[in-house]
């Protein structure tokens, strides 16, 4: 174990290293160098202090603070100095192994599709095709390419099967079923929070604290006071441009008019022209080369978002974001803390020769069925493609990647599933057992909700309120709590079903659910 | 009493062509054709209700609507000044053809390069509509339409108001428009900068029920064009047919107003949306006021209008047209729900059973908008009522539709005063 002091200094060193690689140092330098040039309050004798003072006044200290805060949120806690880098990705060996074999399967599936259809994984587009694509860039949705031969590489339920079969080889579950046995589908001994710990963790959601999503909906005089007060504070937080404050604020929900800016602040997405340039560069990569995954993306969007009552409008934005995303090599950075590893492909004829290995797709992420739903809700907030792209990029490397990689992280999908099942078994034991008996284990139904962070299942405004809390608490555990709350809400009907299909039917339509009341009741009004 | 919702059917009696059998219905949801032919010689008892006004076309025929609005605007300018008249500026510059052809050309020449849209007055669903940028395009279009080479003199004759083929005066009553030849058209400045969502153009459909008061239905929806708007609209010499938003109101993609409202609030803030909705309300009220004196107010009549509104990039709503017979077929279960509730609430308001007092501010999904004056929400501070800018109008457009609850409450209260 690291002692605290060393731990802090290691952390600081890490963060400094991370920030060196970003644009921030050069911006600060620019500000210091050029903006200070003719200012009278900067004197040679006290140069260092004056420049620091200047940077503070012009908001650059805040920006630096926000950048540091971002790294603190994202980087995992420093491990033992002697630990190999894999431990940063995932400390448990059996999890790493399971992830590696899953990846192999996925890549194999992709390669075989590629061989079957005799389509190359990547090819350079001829000039006239490039020109055509460029002219159609804003309306790729009108294209109707023949996608019938493509199938998604995998769907969430395939992934669920893998998770169900996960076992810790070191753990001996002496065969007797005891009082504390876990009867769910997930059988790995990870620590998950119990209700008491969740109550503490989500303290701001408690019954005596105002929430957007509850306290703005009733028609009581005092309600308007809460809402207008909350909006006032929100505007103040935005004016201060303080990421940490914003993250605290958003735990009570975010007013619709302020959401786009607040999320950008929390995710530290700035308006630097470099970001726009980078996006343009990705766009030109898309124009020049055609990747096999592009067809998978097309297919996914057509199957999911285009059929959705709310998101069909944004079809074209989805292509513009997802196609660029698959070319974005900066995404590879997140693999240092993701248990997954980017799939490699080899130049024809040089299989196994590392010199000829290339990451495929360039961002290391093979899309699966439903992937485009991560982007769709963001289209409600951002209409400028490069900003939309940046926000999605941040959301992915902070949260969404955990929903489809096998790891022991508390926000990883394995822990989320286990948390869900434990909550259900502990607090709704009758329902849990009933569903288990009829072969309709609860996780089989709720898995798809959690993998997609409920996108496409909840009404948009409710979904955004939920994602507010994901950002606010920097954790995905709320997804498990909500899933359990939904089951609690529909418990009566579920007790009467006798098959998996009937259970699915009871839970097919979540579009009328109000997220915040459900969460509050489950967390703070359940008899324990 | 027999209540009949089906067109042409009168419950037990069935539809029969003999004139002596007509009038044996209490409530008739008729189509405009029947109305035109039979209204004038149908005796209706006091309690009877029919779903159209005799001369609804004053509002729903594009040329008449424009005429009435222009007249009303002039009146407002004279009586109340330019500021109030400006409230009527929600329809783009429009001219009737052929009668105002010269005025149109004058305006056209003042703004070269702008796009104009030509719409036939009597047809619906986007039929016969096209865009053009050059006067020459109108001529080319006429050639196409008539199917023979239009000689210049025939063209001039049309312009001067004479039908080139039959020789009839073009200014006949619109009721008897000529099938094959010249119809009356309106030509209008095309709104070139519509507000786009996801790159797509859309228009708003709002339902307004007019009885002796004006009521507006809370649940409206926006219809999206099938493809994206091409910022450089390229027009060839022969103008393109129908590039206006997909006028088939039942096909294609819809967003309910609540969705739209959330999206726009996230983008522009709550204040901007409130202003937009107020401006839209203003469209309803002003357009109906402009025909108030013209439309024969028969107490048997009521009408459910479908207003089509377009929002431009500057967040200004424009009135595209008013439909007297808005389509009530549905394209999806959600849509069916909306139309079903719409009709149900309409029938509640018509109140054949006399259950309501007639003074209700809300009936189901309908909000009372105008009752010889604007209607405001009760909780408005009495001091504020005088100042029309701050008063909160009794409108919940796009808000949650808790109509079931509202209706239950409404019908629980014993109605002390019943409608006569």
Image (cartoon, rainbow, N blue to C red):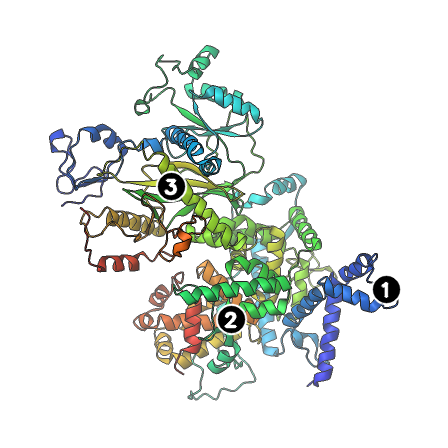
Can residue A395 be seen in this snapshot?
A: no
- Residue found 37% across the figure and 13% down from its top: B165
Which labelled disc corresponds to residue B285? 3
| Position of the N terminus of chain B by quadrant | top left
Check whether the beta carbons of the residues at disc 3 and disc 1 lie within 8 A of each other. no
Give above or below for A186 relative to B133: below
Question: Which residue bears the numbered disc 1?
Answer: A43
Q: Chain of mark 2?
A: A
Distance of mark 2 from mark 1, alpha carbons?
65 Å
Mark 1 Cα within 10 Å, few/some/many (few <14, many 20+)?
few
Q: Are marks 2 and 3 on the same chain?
A: no
- The location of residue B167, given as percent across then percent down, is 36, 12
Determine the secondary structure under disc 3: helix
- The location of residue A331, given as percent across then percent down, is 65, 61
Mark 2 Cα within 10 Å, few/some/many (few <14, many 20+)?
some
Give above or below for B217 relative to A439: above
- A113 relative to A46 in the view: left or right: left
- The location of residue A396, given as percent across then percent down, is 59, 63
């Amino acid at each position: 174990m690291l002692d605290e002091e060393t731990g802090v200094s290691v952390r600081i060193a890490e963060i400094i290293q991370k920030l060196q690689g970003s644009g921030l140092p050069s911006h600060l330098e620019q500000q210091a160098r050029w903006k200070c040039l003719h200012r009278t309050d900067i004197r040679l004798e006290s140069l260092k202090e004056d420049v620091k003072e200047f940077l503070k006044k012009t908001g650059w200290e805040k920006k630096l603070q926000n950048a540091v805060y971002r790294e603190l949120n994202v980087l995992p806690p420093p491990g033992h100095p002697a630990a190999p880098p894999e431990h940063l990705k995932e400390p448990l060996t059996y999890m790493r192994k399971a992830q590696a074999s899953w990846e192999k399967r996925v890549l194999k599936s992709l390669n075989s599709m590629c061989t079957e259809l005799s389509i190359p994984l990547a090819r350079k587009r001829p000039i006239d095709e490039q020109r055509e694509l460029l002219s159609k860039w804003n309306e790729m949705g009108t294209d109707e390419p023949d996608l019938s031969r493509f199938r998604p590489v995998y769907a969430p339920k395939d992934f669920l099967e893998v998770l169900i079969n996960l076992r810790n080889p070191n753990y001996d579950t002496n065969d007797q079923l005891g009082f504390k046995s876990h009867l769910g589908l997930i059988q790995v001994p990870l620590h998950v929070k119990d209700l008491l710990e969740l109550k503490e963790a989500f303290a701001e959601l408690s019954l005596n604290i105002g929430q957007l999503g509850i306290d703005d909906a009733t028609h009581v005089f005092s309600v308007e006071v809460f809402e207008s007060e909350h909006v006032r504070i929100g505007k103040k937080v935005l004016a201060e441009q303080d990421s940490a404050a914003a993250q605290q604020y958003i735990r009570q929900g975010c007013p619709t008019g302020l959401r786009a800016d607040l999320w950008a602040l929390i995710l530290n997405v700035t308006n630097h022209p470099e970001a726009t340039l980078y996006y343009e560069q990705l766009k030109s990569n898309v124009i020049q080369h055609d990747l096999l995954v592009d067809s998978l993306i097309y297919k996914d969007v057509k199957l999911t978002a285009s059929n959705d009552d709310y998101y069909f409008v944004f079809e074209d934005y989805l292509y513009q974001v997802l196609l660029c995303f698959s070319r974005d090599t900066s995404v590879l950075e997140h693999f240092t803390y993701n248990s997954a590893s980017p799939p490699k492909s080899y130049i024809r004829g040089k299989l196994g020769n590392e010199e000829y290995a290339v990451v495929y797709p360039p961002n290391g992420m093979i899309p699966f069925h439903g992937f485009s739903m991560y982007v769709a809700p963001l289209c409600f907030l951002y209409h400028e493609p490069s900003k939309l792209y940046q926000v999605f990029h941040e959301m992915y490397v902070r949260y969404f990647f955990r929903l489809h990689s096998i790891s022991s992280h508390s926000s990883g999908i394995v822990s989320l599933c286990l948390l869900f099942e434990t909550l259900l078994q502990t607090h709704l034991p009758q329902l849990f057992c009933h569903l288990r008996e009829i072969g309709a284990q609860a996780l089989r139904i709720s898995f798809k909700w959690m993998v997609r962070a409920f996108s496409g299942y909840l009404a948009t405004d409710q979904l955004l309120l939920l994602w507010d809390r994901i950002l606010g608490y920097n954790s995905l555990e709320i997804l498990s709590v909500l899933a359990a709350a939904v089951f609690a809400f529909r418990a009566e009907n579920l007790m009467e079903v006798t098959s998996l299909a009937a259970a699915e039917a009871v839970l097919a339509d979540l579009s009328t659910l109000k997220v915040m009341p459900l969460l509050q009741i489950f967390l703070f009004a359940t008899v324990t | 009493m027999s209540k009949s919702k089906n067109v042409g059917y009168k419950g037990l009696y069935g539809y029969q062509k003999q004139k002596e059998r007509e009038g044996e219905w209490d409530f008739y949801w008729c189509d405009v054709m029947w109305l035109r032919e039979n209204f004038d010689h149908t005796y209706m008892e006091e309690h009877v209700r029919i779903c159209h006004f005799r001369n609804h076309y004053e509002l729903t025929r594009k040329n008449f609507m424009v005429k009435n609005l222009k007249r009303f605007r002039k009146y407002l300018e004279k009586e109340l000044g330019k500021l109030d008249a400006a409230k009527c500026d929600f329809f783009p510059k429009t001219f009737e053809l052929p009668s105002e052809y010269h005025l149109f050309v004058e305006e056209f020449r003042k703004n070269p390069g702008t796009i104009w849209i030509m719409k036939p007055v009597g047809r619906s669903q986007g039929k016969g509509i096209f865009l053009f940028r050059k006067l020459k395009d109108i001529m080319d279009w006429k050639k196409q339409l008539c199917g023979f080479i239009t000689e210049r003199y025939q063209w001039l004759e049309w312009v001067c108001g004479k039908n080139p083929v039959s020789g009839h005066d073009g200014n006949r009553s619109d009721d008897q428009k000529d099938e094959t030849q010249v119809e009356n058209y309106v030509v209008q400045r095309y709104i070139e900068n519509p507000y786009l969502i996801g790159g797509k153009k859309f228009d708003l459909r709002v339902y307004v029920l007019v009885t002796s008061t004006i009521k507006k239905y809370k649940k409206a929806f926006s219809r999206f064009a099938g493809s994206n708007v091409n910022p450089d609209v390229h027009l060839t010499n022969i103008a393109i047919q129908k590039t206006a938003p997909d006028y088939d109101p039942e096909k294609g993609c819809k967003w309910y107003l609540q969705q739209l409202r959330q999206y726009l609030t996230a983008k522009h803030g709550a204040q901007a949306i409130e202003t937009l909705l107020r401006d839209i309300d203003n469209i309803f009220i002003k357009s109906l006021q402009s025909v108030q004196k013209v439309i024969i107010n028969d107490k048997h009549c009521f009408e459910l209008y479908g207003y089509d509104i377009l929002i431009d990039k500057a967040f200004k709503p424009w009135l595209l047209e008013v439909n007297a017979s808005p389509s009530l077929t549905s394209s999806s279960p959600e849509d069916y729900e909306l139309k079903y509730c719409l009709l149900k609430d309409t029938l509640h308001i018509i109140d054949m059973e006399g259950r309501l007092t007639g003074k209700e501010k809300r009936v189901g999904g309908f909000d009372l908008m105008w009752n010889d004056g604007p209607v405001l929400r009760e909780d408005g501070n009495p001091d504020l009522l005088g100042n029309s800018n701050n008063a909160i109008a009794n409108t919940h457009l796009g808000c949650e539709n808790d109509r079931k609850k509202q209706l239950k409450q409404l019908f629980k209260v014993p109605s002390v005063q019943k409608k006569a």
